[in-house]
Image (spheres, rainbow, N blue to C red):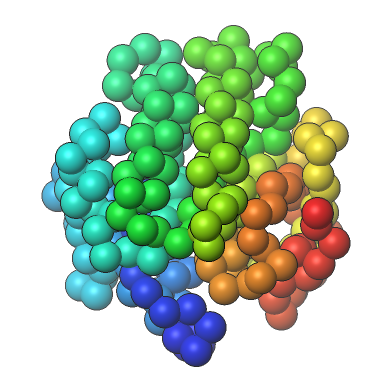
Amino acid sequence: MDSRDLFSGRVLVAGASGRTGSWVVKRLRHYNIPVRALVRSLERASGFDADVEIALGSLQDRAALDKAVTGCTGVISAVGSSALTGDASPSAVDRDGVIRLADAALSAGVKHFGLVSSLAVTRWYHPLNLFGGVLSMKFAAEEHIRKIFSQNGRSYTIVRPGGLKDGEPLQHTMVVGQGDHMWSGWTNRSDVAELLVLSLWLDKARNRTFEVVSGEEQVQDSLEYCYDNLS
């Protein structure tokens, strides 16, 4: 499928070598959208096809991020912390790293920023916050993105999935909510990727934050309907 009549430009994928980020890359290429994958090392880029451009850098390196976002129209962040302390901690990755990436994108003139967040980010008392305050860190990044990408012709889409699972896209109905009222559920990484790719060209996806979990097993033609009733 070719979406070049709907979206034109290159998209930077942060966290591209991760399990969710790799699905973002796949779905972008499914729609023939040029991809630049942000990875920390060439070893992490070994699994990408030759048509995926590679940008080396970390979320802690603003100069590398400035270079990575140059020439991109969109950014999709699928990063996630993997340690309690240090450069891979929730504060360093889910908050400061995403904020640094968003600021670099803003300075480079990026038009749309998509973010993989999580259910329950507004619930400071959730048990997951015992792990470095990960949900609170994600929410802080959300707030920053909403502030800087909701004006002057820019836009954002923030997807808050449930527990992430592997599987092919478009195989389940999707249950959508807003206001952070969902406590549990799971979501296929591939469907999260699909929703963020669709947000690049769907007007009804612009400046929206929402929760989504997988429902019944049923093949879907599209996930565009997930954006129908959002505010």
Asked if one can make out residue 24 in the rendered structure from this viewpoint, the answer is: no
Q: Residue at x 59, y 42 (%)?
A: 146
Residue 43 x %, y %: 16, 47
Q: Residue at x 53, y 68 (%)?
A: 200
Report the side of 60 relative to 132 (left or right): left
Report the side of 46 relative to 199 (left or right): left
Against 63, is 155 above or below?
below
The image quadrant that residue 167 belongs to is: bottom right
Report the side of 104 relative to 40 (left or right): right
Q: Residue at x 20, y 72 (%)?
A: 50
In the picture as drawn, the residue positioned furthest to the left comes out as 42
Residue 2 x %, y %: 47, 88
Residue 156 x %, y %: 57, 53
Q: Residue at x 70, y 76 (%)?
A: 222
Report the side of 127 relative to 29 (left or right): right
Asked if one can make out residue 129 in the rendered structure from this viewpoint, the answer is: yes
Residue 99 x %, y %: 42, 34
